[in-house]
Image (cartoon, helix red, strand yellow):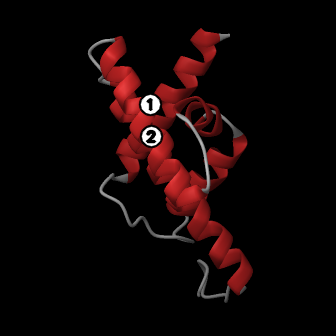
Amino acid sequence: MRAPGGLFMSAGRARRLRVEADKLEAYCLLVRAASVASDQAAFADVSRAAATALRAKFGGGSITSAFAWLSGPAAQDALASVRAGEVELHGTLSLVELEQAVALAKEAETLQR
């Protein structure tokens, strides 16, 4: 796989970037779904579905962990890799939508503290 500038990227780095981009996309979808839940029951439904999906795709996780991860440095690194063209998005969200979801997660984490 080529990195920006035409340099080759190691298989391990390419694999790590792919996993991080997949996690970024999945977590952003969860944050967006949770943010439009109309009430506590809808949020609980999203939470249960999220736990099942995250267990299947990543071996575990929750909405809480998604918000925390998106608020941290790993999400910023994943976004930087997408912006730099080191890894492509495979999901339905655009880069702008991902950035909005990350900002929403950061805001929610700040309010929770």
Question: Where, quadrant-wise, is the C terminus in this rendering?
Answer: top right
Note whether 113 is above or below 7 in the view shown: above
Question: Viewer-proximal residue, 111 or 6?
Answer: 111
For image coordinates 62% across by 35% down, the residue present is 65
In the picture of the structure, the residue carrying the numbered disc 2 is: 50
- Residue 33, percent from left and from top: 34, 33
Q: Kindly indicate the quadrant of the structure image that contains residue 111.
A: top right
Note whether 15 is above or below 72 in the view shown: below
Which element type, helix, strand or loop, lies under badge 1? Answer: helix
For image coordinates 50% across by 36% down, the residue present is 102
Q: For the residue carrying disc 1, how many other residues have a C-alpha within 10 Å: few (<14), some (14-19), or many (20+)?
A: some
Q: Are marks 1 and 2 in contact (CB under 8 Å)?
A: yes
In the picture of the structure, the residue carrying the numbered disc 1 is: 47
Please give the count of numbered marks on the rendered protein.
2
- Residue 108, percent from left and from top: 53, 18
Q: Kindly indicate the quadrant of the structure image that contains residue 112.
A: top right
Specify whether 43 is left or right of 3.
Answer: left
Which element type, helix, strand or loop, lies under badge 2? Answer: helix
- Residue 98, percent from left and from top: 42, 45
Question: Viewer-proximal residue, 49 or 104?
Answer: 49
Q: Amino acid at mark 2?
A: Ala
Q: For the residue carrying disc 2, how many other residues have a C-alpha within 10 Å: few (<14), some (14-19), or many (20+)?
A: many
Q: Amino acid at mark 1?
A: Ser
For image coordinates 59% across by 87% down, the residue present is 1
For image coordinates 58% across by 57% down, the residue present is 58
